[in-house]
Amino acid sequence: MEKQGRIVVTMPAYHAEQTLEKTYRDIPDGLADDVVVVDDASNDGTAAVARRLGLKVFVHPANRGYGGNQKTCYDEALRLGASIVVLLHPDYQYDPKTLSALVEPLLAGRADFTFGSRFARGADPRTGGMPLYRYVGNRLTTAVENLLLGTHFAELHSGLKAYTSDFLRRSDYHAYSDDFVFDSQMIIDAVLSGARVEEVPIPTRYTEESSSISVVRSLRYIALTVVELARLKRRHARARRMATARRG
């Protein structure tokens, strides 16, 4: 697929000094027009490594959380004139070499939003090191979300994503949480608003450096995801009723 438009890869970084460079080096040659690193007030050398690599670096003066970090990532990518915005964790958990496949549906014009799926085509991410509690939580929450959304995705909790700039400008991501549930809000809102969402098979790779939230935070994330799903479904249903009433 011939590259069209401007692709900006964003990295929401927190204590990524040890893994940021090898993540960046594995991005396919020629794919990214710009690479943006947003350092969420790390107390290590994350920002220094990013600057040494010649990347565009933005540092939060105080920790804003994973969702807050993404908001800055997307804001800065759009300011750079991105046509496609990629979210890539700098902890080396997701293989940067898969970015070409991730952006292909966007370049082809058949999707507005793509995400890497470690469960697609019957894959078992436990063979790649996914902890059992993460595996069970992912499967359970994805099943509940599919049931309530009427979708059939193999996974709905991946941190590897890509969007068209038009999709991001239409979305209300500034109103989302600054915590981990930001990811769920983004995809739930996308499905309910009728965006074209496509999952792309990717390998699973957990290493000692890979970031991971605790069991307690994972359970909280699952609970908040279900709450947000119900809330956003009500909001979209209300908006549809109001639109119908106006047309009537």
Image (spheres, rainbow, N blue to C red):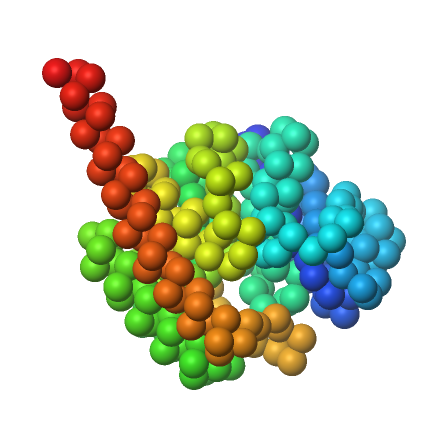
Q: Residue at x 35, y 49 (%)?
A: 188
Q: Residue at x 25, y 43 (%)?
A: 234
Q: Residue at x 69, y 56 (%)?
A: 63
Question: On the image, which quarter does residue 235 sit in?
Answer: top left
Image position, residue 138 (x, y; %): 38, 70
Image position, residue 135 (x, y; %): 40, 77
Q: Quadrant location of the C terminus?
A: top left
Relative horizontal placement of residue 100, taking residue 122 as reference (left or right): right
Image position, residue 187 (x, y; %): 39, 49
Q: Residue at x 32, y 53 (%)?
A: 229
Q: Nearer the viewer, residue 185 or 138?
A: 185
Relative horizontal placement of residue 81, taking residue 125 as reference (left or right): right
Q: Nearer the viewer, residue 205 or 223?
A: 223
Q: Is residue 177 visible?
A: yes
Relative horizontal placement of residue 243, taking residue 49 as reference (left or right): left
Q: Is residue 37 visible?
A: no
Q: Is 173 rendered above or below residue 143?
A: above
Q: Nearer the viewer, residue 116 or 4?
A: 116
Question: On the image, which quarter does residue 26 sit in?
Answer: bottom right
Q: Nearer the viewer, residue 225 or 204?
A: 225
Image position, residue 102 (x, y; %): 48, 51
Q: Is 59 rendered above or below residue 159?
A: above
